[in-house]
Each structure stands twice: as structure tokens, then as C-alpha cells.
Amino acid sequence: MKYSSEAVEKAIHELAKLPGIGRKSAQRHVFFLLKSSADEVTELAQALLDLKSRVKYCSVCFNITEQDPCDICSNPRRDTGTICVVEEANDIIALENTGEYKGLYHVLGGVLSPLDGVGPDDLRIRELLKRLSENVKEVILATNPNTEGEATAIYLSKLIKPMNIKLSRIARGIPVGADLEYADELTLVRALAGRMEF
């Protein structure tokens, strides 16, 4: 259904471009904003403008930041000998929330996906290899355990192994609180292969 207001139609059209938001969700958001105060809508608009004007990529690790280098790269308490390679900047948030990892990161900006036209030159692989010449002792590959993530990890391992740097992959397996009977075969195979001494 088209609305008689061009502004409503344009807002719905623009919101529907966001991932995970279809036209119906966009309509709900637009009508919520119409009921909101002008101040609330202005704050949202300003937050979006600030997002584009103030946030940039760290020149070292390509994490999102407002200062360059980012807080992680400029923290003297971080282990500079370890780099965890992730697909996107939001993966860093997940790892940082654990409070366990104390090294540095490198954001690839995606994964290898020939079907989507994404090759090695489209990722920040050259920048990673350049960083590895600076006293790095270990690289942890933390790409997602799907076809593209695995292909990217294998590709990177072939480039890094000749450099005599310790190379590891994050463990995969049964999530905490899950029942074995509900796990698929591939997850069980990976859990068995990644078992640790008790």
C-alpha cells in the first residue's frame, strides 16, 4: 500500500534498505517515529549523522573507532605478539565481551566468496601479512565456521604457515547448555576433533 504522504513513503523506502527490515517492519518504524516527539526524532537523526561523520576504521586493525589508532591498538597492556583475525568489526565486540582475550585484532572486512565476486584482493589480507612481519608470535583465525569462513581460514593458513608463526583456529563444537542429542553430526565431529585433555 502506498501512502498519500511522499515523506512517509520515502522514509519507509529508506528504512526497508536496512538488513533484516522489510517493508512491513519499515512501516512500523515510521509510524513509531511519527508518534515520537520532534526531539526524539532529531536525536536519532543526529546520532546517524554522527555515525557517518565521526566513526572511521583504525589504520592498524580496521576496527571501527573515533580515534586512530583505536583503543585496542593503542592500549600498551595488550599483547602485541598475538593477532586474532576476524571477519567484521562486530566480531571484536563478541570476543571482547568475554574478557579473556588480551591480544590485538585484524578485521578482514569480509570473507572469500567467489560466488559473490569477493576474492583475496577485496579483503585486508595484504595489510595482515604486513603486520605479521612485526614480531607477531601467534595468529588466531576466528572466521565463522561456515563454508566461506572455512575457505578464508584455509587460504590464510597457506599464506601464514611458511612465516613460522604459530597458527591456531578458534575451537568449535557443542555450545554450553546444549544437549548432545540435538547437535548435528558436523558439530559433533568438530567437538570430538577439538577435544582437550581434562
Image (spheres, rainbow, N blue to C red):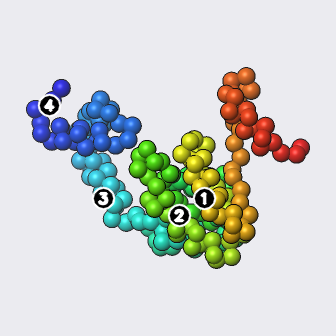
Sort mark 4 into few (<14), some (14-19) or many (20+) by Cα contacts within 10 Å.
few
Q: What label does residue 49 carry, if any? A: 3
Q: Which residue is painted at 48% across and 68% down in the image?
A: 58
Looking at the image, the residue that sits furthest to the right is: 198
Sort mark 3 into few (<14), some (14-19) or many (20+) by Cα contacts within 10 Å.
few
Q: CA distance from mark 4 to mark 1?
A: 51 Å
Q: CA distance from mark 3 to mark 2?
A: 30 Å
Instruction: Specify the quadrant that holds the N terminus.
Output: top left
Q: Return the residue at label 2.
A: 125
Q: What label does residue 156 carry, if any? A: 1
Q: Return the residue at label 4.
A: 3
Question: Looking at the rendering, which quadrant does residue 167 occupy?
Answer: bottom right
The earlier-in-sequence mark between 1 and 3 is 3
Q: Residue 24: percent from the left, percent from the top? A: 29, 29
Nearer the observer, 45 or 74 = 74
Quick check: can you spot residue 105? yes
Q: Is residue 195 left or right of residue 164?
A: right
Q: CA distance from mark 4 to mark 3?
A: 27 Å
Q: CA distance from mark 2 to mark 1?
A: 8 Å
- Type of residue at label 2? Ile
Q: Which residue is painted at 45% across and 65% down in the image?
A: 57
